[in-house]
Structure formats: C-alpha cells, structure tokens
Image (cartoon, rainbow, N blue to C red):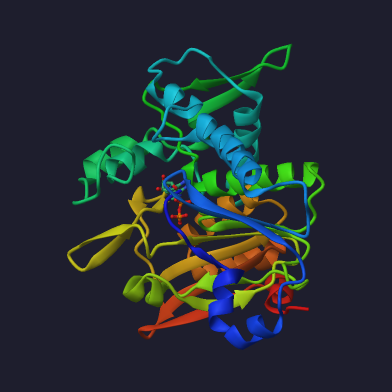
Amino acid sequence: MKSFKLALLLSLCVITVSACQKDAPKQNVVNVQGQTMGTYYSVSVFGQDKLDAESLEAEANKAFSQVINAISTFDDSEILRFNNFKSTEPFAISPYLASVIEESRRESLRLGGAMDFTVGPLVDLWGFGPKAKPTVSPTQEQIDAAKKLVGLDKYELRRDALGNAYLVKTNPDVRLDLSTIGEGLGADLLASRLQELGITNYIVSVAGASRSLGYNASNKEFKIGIEDPDLVMKQGSGIYSVICPHGQAVSTAGSYRNYFEENGLRYSHIIDPTTGKPITHKTVSVTVVGDTAAKTDALDTGLLVLGKDEAIKWAQRNDEAIYVIYVEDGKLKAAHSRAFEKYLKCQ
Ligand code: ADP
Ligand code: MG
C-alpha cells in the first residue's frame, strides 16, 4: 500500500494539452487529494451538488479508516492484533474483515496461491514489513523456517451459529498480510459510498487502484495512464499506455518502486510464496481490469509473481483482462490478454 502507480486522466491533460484546452469543462468538479495508507489518493466527482470538498474528504477518510482499522500492518488494526495474538485460540473479527479474507482467499485459490495473504512471515523476514528496511537477503534456513508458516492451510475462518466470525491459527507465529489489497479495498468502499449518495460521475484512485463511473468534466469517459516503469525510475513519473476502463476497476502491481539491490539483482517487495523469495524476473508490472478493485488488486500481485508468460496464459484461460509490461532485450515491451482488448479502445 505504498506506491502511486496509476497516473490519472488529469495528468493526461499534460500529455494532450490541446485536446484538454478545446474541451472546456462542461460539468462542475469537486476534487480532493491526500495521503492514506502510506500512499496518495485522489477523488473527483463531476456534475453534482451533493458534496463539497470538505464532505468529500470526510467520506474518503471514513472509507479509508475502515480499511486501516481492518488490515493495516502499520497502524493499530484487527490484523495487527491477530498477528500479535500468539495463540491458537479463536480470535474474533469483524464481519468486514471476514468478508475481505473470504474474497481474497477465493482469488488466491484461483491463482494457485501465487497471491497468498499468509505471506506475512516472509515479508517481515525480507525486511519489507513494518519492522525493518530491506538491506540483505536472509539465509535459506531462515527462509525455510518462515515458509513453514505460510499457506492458506495455516489459518481457519470459523463462523458460529450467530454468524460471528473468528480466525484461528495453526501455529501462534502465523501472520496475515492483506496490505496488497488495501488500495483496492479503499477505492471500492469510497466508490460504493459515492454510488449510495447518488453520485454517478466519479473517479477514485488510491495509489495503483482505481474505480470510476460515468463521465468527466468534459463529458468524456475516463482515461487511465499505465505507468512507464523506466520513466518512473528515471524521473519519478511517466505514462506507458493509456486505457479506458469503461466503468470497471483497474489496478496495477509493479516491481519497480519498492525493492532493494544486492549483487546486481533487484529484489522486489512482491514475494513468490513457492520459493519464499522476492521476484527477480523480467516482468515489471501487471495491470488488471475487473468488477472490483479488491479483486483486481489481489490478482495483479499474484499475476506479477507468475510472470508474463504464465500470467497471460492464466488470463486467456480465465477470460480476465490483463496488461503486462516486461523487459526483453533490454527494452520494455507489453502484452495483453484477449479480454483486455476493449480497454485499449476509448469511445
Ligand atoms: P504495490 O506496491 O505493487 O502496490 P502493494 O503495496 O499493493 O504492491 O503490495 C505489496 C505488499 O504485498 C508487500 O509489501 C507485502 O506486504 C505483500 N505481498 C508480497 N508478496 C505477496 C504475495 N505473493 N501475496 C500477497 N501479498 C504479498
Ligand atoms: Mg495488488
């Protein structure tokens, strides 16, 4: 929940200045930008008079607080308390966290465990967790020990007759890490709230996850920029490709912002649960379009673990819309699945 991967439509105005100048705003805009979950967010609503900037900001903070209270590994949260609960007794959790875990588990199973939110002990071991900054690789022995705590069979979600939910660890040291879907959860909650309020034109972006509906101030559909990993590393920002989400959620996972280098190898903060090691392959980002940002945010991480070839094969088999940026012969290249085709076309 740390990087800012999707540059928004507004930045697109920087690229297509003349188009933006010709299309003078036809709808009023309320925009709020800020920080949450260690990253940046932006929300804009168009052509409505229900929310001013102050109340929009309050709605955003309310949505993000719900996510932080459930899953943060930095601030006090249900997950943090569960991780610190060194016991195999049942631990009561909120209905919201229970539904988040159930949904993430579904996506994890679809990917054969490439995205696995029990990866917490490995994340901490490699120094990407809340405790330390990554500097050197752990030993194979340490990796093997941490791997014994990782896997979807290492916890159980139980419900009692009244529907109350509990998490149970198989080992007191099991630790969950749902941070990879935090941005998606935040974008989904805020989008749902805006829809509840009857707002039909909006775009929400929390770092690499976005939700949008309807039209922008110029009555045009929203455009999202997929970051250029080289430009981001060289100058902090840059767009590789522009897509139109047609009302769907979009999220990107990348290995180019959060990593450390040792002996010429770049270790990303995305960990392959099978090897217990950070990915070091040549796939640098995966963008997924789908119904909810929680789902796309879970999938992008797992597909990045699988790497370009496996990810594209998986997406073709499952009819999912994905766009992969990878390095070949020292150059960035892109590939996408069949279902992604329609997002490359704007109306
Ligand atoms: P990005 O910076 O690409 O948005 P996120 O911050 O959303 O990535 O997610 C990266 C975080 O997800 C890592 O810092 C770690 O806490 C967790 N993580 C790493 N590998 C995995 C994995 N294979 N499955 C689930 N979570 C992971
Ligand atoms: Mg993700």
**Which is more toward the observer, 322 or 60?**
60
- Number of numbered labels in the structure image: 0
**Which is more toward the observer, 12 or 267?**
12
Quarter occupied by residue 224:
bottom right
Q: Residue at x 41, y 78 (%)?
A: 327
**Which is more toward the observer, 16 or 53?**
53
- Residue 52 appears in the rendering: yes
Q: Does residue 3 lie above or below 87 as drawn?
A: below
Image location of residue 149, percent across then percent down: 39, 32
Image location of residue 22, percent across then percent down: 69, 85
**Which is more toward the observer, 216 or 227?**
216
Q: Does residue 79 lie above or below 246 as drawn?
A: above
Q: In which quadrant will I find the C terminus?
A: bottom right
**Image position of 234 (left or right of 79):** left
Quarter occupied by residue 331:
bottom left
Q: Does residue 125 lie above or below 286 as drawn?
A: above
Image location of residue 3, percent across then percent down: 43, 56
**Image position of 215 (left or right of 311):** right
**Image position of 227 (left or right of 281):** right
Q: Residue at x 35, y 84 (%)?
A: 330
Q: Residue at x 42, y 41 (%)?
A: 119
Q: Residue at x 25, y 66 (%)?
A: 265
Q: Does residue 20 lie above or below 340 as drawn?
A: below
Image location of residue 222, percent across then percent down: 69, 69
- Residue 211 appears in the rendering: no
